[in-house]
Amino acid sequence: MLSFKGEIVDRQLITREGHQRLLQELEQLRKVELPKNVQAIAEARAHGDLSENAEFHAAKERQSIIAAKMADIEGILARTEVVDPLPPHNGRVVFGVKVKLYDPEADEECQFQIVGQAEGDASCGRISLSSPIGQALIGREEGDEVRVKTPGGLRVLEIVEILTAD
């Protein structure tokens, strides 16, 4: 933990790729979305009476959303610590590895990378280290069966293979 102006800040881990994704998103917001929105505000302002100008109010609201998203990403970047290179897995599930799992109930395999909280997105195959499944997998080996309490109920998963992240 770090102390910053009297506050305690927890450092969160992030992969190099996750850090790059956040930087790219911030760049997109700063250099593309924000200037485009400023132009939309200027165009809406040119239409006259601002009190009843829906385009103006929508553009101002969009500007607030963009500013909030930028502040959120900047906050995440300030609290994260890039783990690069990723630690060797030595046959165990550790931060950054990809894990191939078998779900006997669904009779299917799935693959996830164990990542930091800021970059977790199960729909993209990245689960957070702090998620129930992430916590259950850490330190386990190929062939291990893990039981995980999830919001959808108890899940049983078998670790089929531990892969090094690309």
Image (tube, helix red, strand yellow):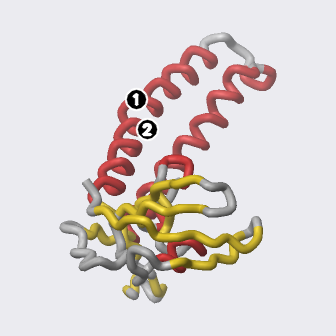
For the point 75% across and 20% down, the residue is: 53
Q: Nearer the viewer, residue 131 or 74?
A: 131
Side (left or right) of 58 relative to 39: right
The reply, left or right, for residue 141 in relation to residue 131 is left
The residue nearer to you, when weighing 36 against 132, is 132
Q: Which residue is mark 1?
A: 32
Q: Quadrant of residue 115?
A: bottom left
- Which residue does the numbered mark 2 point to in the structure image? 29
Q: Is residue 39 left or right of residue 97?
A: right
The image position of residue 86, as x and y in percent, is 24, 69
Q: Secondary structure at mark 1?
A: helix
Crowding around mark 2 (Cα neighbors within 10 Å: few <14, some 14 to 19, many 20+) is some
**As displayed, is residue 132 above or below residue 114?**
below
Q: Which mark is residue 49?
A: none
Mark 1 vs 2: CB contact within 8 A = yes
- The x, y position of residue 69, in whole percent, is 53, 48
In percent of width and height, residue 71 lies at 48, 55
Question: Is residue 67 shown above or below 147?
Answer: above
Q: Position of residue 76 (x, y in %)?
A: 44, 63
Disc 1 to disc 2, how far (Cα)? Answer: 6 Å
**Dot 1, how many residues are within 10 Å of its Cα: few (below 14), some (14-19), or many (20+)?**
few
Report the side of 79 relative to 132 (left or right).
left
What amino acid is at disc 1? Val
Name which residue lies at 76% across and 65% down: 152
Residue at 50 percent across and 27 percent down: it is: 38
Image quarter (top left, top right, bottom left or bottom right) of the N terminus: bottom left
Secondary structure of the residue carrying tag 2 is helix
